[in-house]
Image (cartoon, rainbow, N blue to C red):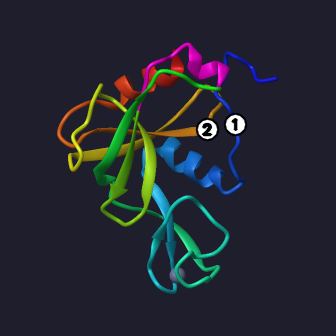
Amino acid sequence: MSDKSRPPVNRSRLWRHVNAAAAEGVFKLQVCDACHKVQYPPREFCSGCLSDALTWEPVSAGGTALSWTRSHSSVSRFFKDKLPLHVGIIKLDCGPVLFAHLSMDSLQTGARVQIMGRPDKSGQTVFFARPADTGTADEFSMIIKE
Ligand SMILES: [Zn+2]
């Protein structure tokens, strides 16, 4: 049974690199040394060329909103107290697409956003998207810390 006071933790061991980068306040993803593809989520091998020569590097945190939704339900006991959740799918300028919590109640498709990682109550990094020219890191953390 899940602990209602903590968010769910189901991440691969590679996620520790994401957590370490977020703790430094840096947005890092895996970059392939062979083909230079930036990939997310973390994997043991490059999804472009299958090389295992992957390096964690700072990458652009800018991106474009592909879609978003407001969720009024959750199977997680932790998130049931935080509804509605505003989440979006963001296409990063460096290539990958990721899922992020939104700092706003709505988002235009095609809007420019900035991604940042912040630790949740379990110490796992959660990605947040904010409009590219507004917001602070602290306001994002409130969503998962309360
Ligand atoms: Zn590659």
List x then y, in percent, for residue 103.
33, 29
Task: Indicate which disc, 1 or 2, sits on the residue closer to the N terminus.
Answer: 1
User: Is label 2 in a helix, a strand or a loop?
Assistant: loop
List x then y, in percent, for residue 137.
35, 31
Is residue 77 rendered magenta in the image? yes
Q: Which of 88 and 63 is in front in this view?
A: 88
Q: Is residue 53 left or right of residue 90?
A: right
Is residue 63 rendered magenta in the image? no
Is 78 situated above or below 17?
Answer: above
C-alpha separation, residue under disc 1 versus residue under disc 2: 7 Å
Residue occupying the point 21% across, 43% down: 132
Is 41 situated above or below 48?
Answer: above
Mark 1 or 2, closer to the camera: 1
Residue occupying the point 69% across, 36% down: 9
Is mark 1 in CB contact (under 8 Å) with mark 2? yes
Quadrant in the picture for residue 3 = top right
Residue occupying the point 46% across, 46% down: 99
Q: Pick out the residue farthest to the right.
A: 1
Q: Pick out the residue farthest to the left.
A: 133
Q: Which amino acid does label 1 sit on?
A: Val
Question: Which residue corresponds to mark 2?
Answer: 124
User: Is label 1 in a helix, a strand or a loop?
Assistant: loop
Question: Which residue corresponds to mark 1?
Answer: 9
Q: What residue type is labelled 2?
A: Gln
Residues shaded magenta? 76-86
Residue occupying the point 61% across, 82% down: 50
Q: Nearer the viewer, residue 121 or 84?
A: 84
Q: In the rendering, which numbered label is found on residue 79?
A: none
